[in-house]
Image: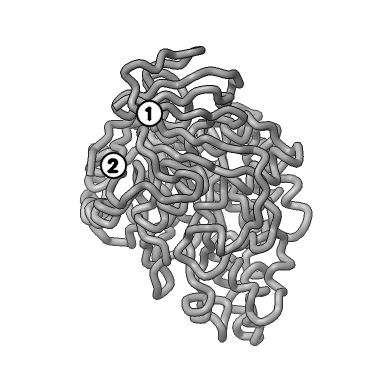
Amino acid sequence: MATIITNGEIITASDRYHADIRIDAGVITTIGRDLPVTEVDTVIDAAGRWVIPGGVDVHTHLDMPFMGTMSSDDFYTGTRAAAHGGTTSIVDFAISFRGQDYDEVLDNWMAKARGKAVFDYGLHMAMTWYDTPDAKAGVLSCIERGVSSFKTFMAYKGVLGVEDPELFDFMRDMGQLNIPVSMHAENGSIVESMQKAFVEQGKLTPEYHGLSRPSGVEGEATASAIALARYADCKLYIVHLTCQEALDAVREARQRGQAVYAETCPQYLMFDDEVYRRPDFEGAKWVMSPPIRPKGHQDYLWAGLADGSLQAVATDHCPFNFETQKQMGRESFTKIPNGAPGIGDRMGVMYTFGVKTGRIDVHKWIDTCCTFPARFFDMFPRKGTIAVGSDADIVIFDPTTAYTMGVDKSEHNCDYNAYEGMQGYGSFDMVFSRGRLLWDHGEWKGSAGMGGYLKRRAGGAPELVEG
């Protein structure tokens, strides 16, 4: 079944031009001017609009158990919401706990996604133990099964986090395999001590979540992770970077030639820690780790995106309903489930507050939200760009449309939206995954189970496993 998208302006991370696109069997087969429409089933006129790659979100937490509850989006509602906002592939985190068999964890996460994901997905594995032959064999098995990236934690000691000797051993082995290690960089010991002190003092409101995890704690951990990766000769990727101290550490490492990369998230660009002082417990909506930072860090992060010190924008989408799940921490900030919705907002927020304001140009928007994440995490050129041979993960985008952001606009399975009431620009008029139409001017056209598993391998294009 052939489709032609005609008269649109194609924009990628590096190019901008007018051309037509022909799609056959879900793949872009031709790009050129005035393509013939004979033997074509569908012709779509994209005049006056942009044709861009579908977004790639490499940091999501769908159907994840955490802090006594479960993130409220599963692989159907989460990928559906993502597609509504222009994202057409994700890499979710398979979360293991210390001592769990890695193959069983991977089986569990693939079962969560199978029959539900509306577009293609990959999986990172959380490395939470590496001190036995079984653990090391499990990691190698995951790599054979298409997991080409692992996440480690310096926080949540005893549950998700590991100590430096174990972490260094893992980094050294991954470096030899050219497998990047992603890092949640916060000094967990300091966080635990500060949390305990606030609780003992009766300081229990959401404000103290942020105060118990100050930016210096993230900066110190980021510098420590960089040092470990340097001596292990391992590629390092800092997830959800929030602050000047951490960005300075990344920038310094990159300037001396170390293979260090970092992502930030829209919430850290858009909000300051005043959100935690909102009345009626509303600050709990922004309780996430690392926390929202004081005013000033946001501009520093925007500058880091513009100059390339930050390479990617992901969401860390981990939603919990305010009226029920967030209320678990009403009596203490330490019990508020950490996380917020955002998988459907990312592309629009970055266009509205990045491109429209002149903080970043349109190519940086595409690169940080689509191309670099796909390239770094072994999905490119299948994903993340518009090119002959790439999957037809395509968005027809109207840059002129205005709308009001909020829970009524988003498709998240969550009862609040972090950007409620803000003015947004741009509409994702038509969203395609491998040439199959998911959204058509706000009307859902997709179905659960359309997505396949991306079996990734270090340095290569992924193999798609259907179903």
Left or right position of 91 against 8: left
Residue 196 picture location, percent across and down: 58, 78
Q: Residue 313: which quarter of the image?
A: top right
Badge 1 amino acid: Thr
Secondary structure beneath disc 2? Answer: loop
Query: Is residue 164 visible from the viewing direction of this image?
Result: no
Badge 2 amino acid: Gly
Total marks shown come to 2
Secondary structure beneath disc 1? Answer: strand
The quadrant of the picture occupied by the N terminus is: top left
Residue 118 picture location, percent across and down: 34, 48
Residue 231 picture location, percent across and down: 49, 36
Depicted 423 relative to depicted 463: above or below:
below
- Residue 42 is marked as 1
- The answer to whether marks 1 and 2 mark residues whose Cβ atoms lie closer than 8 Å is no
Residue 444 picture location, percent across and down: 41, 50
Q: Nearer the viewer, residue 252 or 74?
A: 74
Residue furthest to the front in view is 38
Q: Nearer the viewer, residue 273 or 402?
A: 402
Query: Is residue 374 visible from the viewing direction of this image?
Result: yes
Q: Residue at x 42, y 28 (%)?
A: 380
- Gap in angstroms between the C-alphas marked 1 and 2: 24 Å
The quadrant of the picture occupied by the C terminus is: top left
Q: Residues within 10 Å of mark 2 (few under 14, many from 20)?
A: many
Q: Residues within 10 Å of mark 1 (few under 14, many from 20)?
A: some
Depicted 398 relative to depicted 38: above or below:
below
What residue is disc 2 on?
A: 452
Q: Residue at x 45, y 52 (%)?
A: 60
Residue furthest to the right in view is 296
Q: Residue at x 68, y 45 (%)?
A: 352
Q: Residue at x 73, y 52 (%)?
A: 297
